[in-house]
Amino acid sequence: MIKEDKPQIIDLPKVHDNRGNLTFIENSRHIPFDIKRVYYLYDVPGGESRGGHAHKQLRQYIIAASGSFDVVLDDGKNKTRFTLNRSYYGLYVPTMTWRELENFSSGSVCLVLASEYYDPSDYYYTYEDFIKAVKENEAD
């Protein structure tokens, strides 16, 4: 059972074959949203990080399609580090979660499935704005 308000590792189907394995993702079946956008990060230089933002409405599912990297999630109260290093599972990231991607291995590919189309107004670009919004949401 997927808790849509909590970050969590979600396993994907893995079909074993002597010729190589196959993993697939079906819309709203393996992850808790319809996929509206797919993008990937690659050739990230050593020591660099990505992310550094949060989303108001968008949810994501992040997969290490190749290599490995860490995802540090922050809900405004707690930080949790997830190491992604297999292509048959990924990390579900709910709304209102600050994310940092770091420690990319050489040749790694970060595949991201998103619940919404790109919309700059959906982002919190500074940590201060994100924390302010978290506190406002708690007051409601």
Image: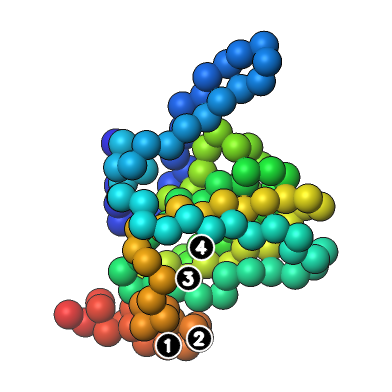
**Cα gap from disc 4 to disc 1, whole angstroms:** 16 Å
In this figure, which residue is indicated by the disc labeled 3? Answer: 98
Tell me the residue at 43%/37% (across/down).
25
In this figure, which residue is indicated by the disc labeled 2? Answer: 126
**Cα gap from disc 4 to disc 2, whole angstroms:** 15 Å
Tell me the residue at 66%/20% (across/down).
20
Q: Visible in this render: residue 77? A: no
Percent position (x, y) of residue 19?
A: 68, 15
Tell me the kind of residue under disc 3.
Trp
Instruction: Give residue 71's quadrant in the image.
Output: bottom right
**Cα gap from disc 3 to disc 1, whole angstroms:** 11 Å
Percent position (x, y) of residue 17?
A: 61, 13
Question: What kind of element bears circle 4?
Answer: strand
**Cα gap from disc 2 to disc 1, whole angstroms:** 5 Å
Question: What kind of element bears circle 1?
Answer: helix
Q: Visible in this render: residue 114? A: yes
Asked if the residue at tag 3 contacts the one at tag 4, i.e. Cβ–Cβ closer than 8 Å, the answer is yes
Tell me the kind of residue under disc 1.
Asp
Asked if the residue at tag 2 contacts the one at tag 3, i.e. Cβ–Cβ closer than 8 Å, the answer is no
In this figure, which residue is indicated by the disc labeled 1? Answer: 129
Disc 3 residue crowd, few under 14, some 14–19, many 20+, Cα 10 Å: many
For residue 16, above or below residue 67:
above
For residue 69, above or below residue 65:
below
In this figure, which residue is indicated by the disc labeled 4? Answer: 73
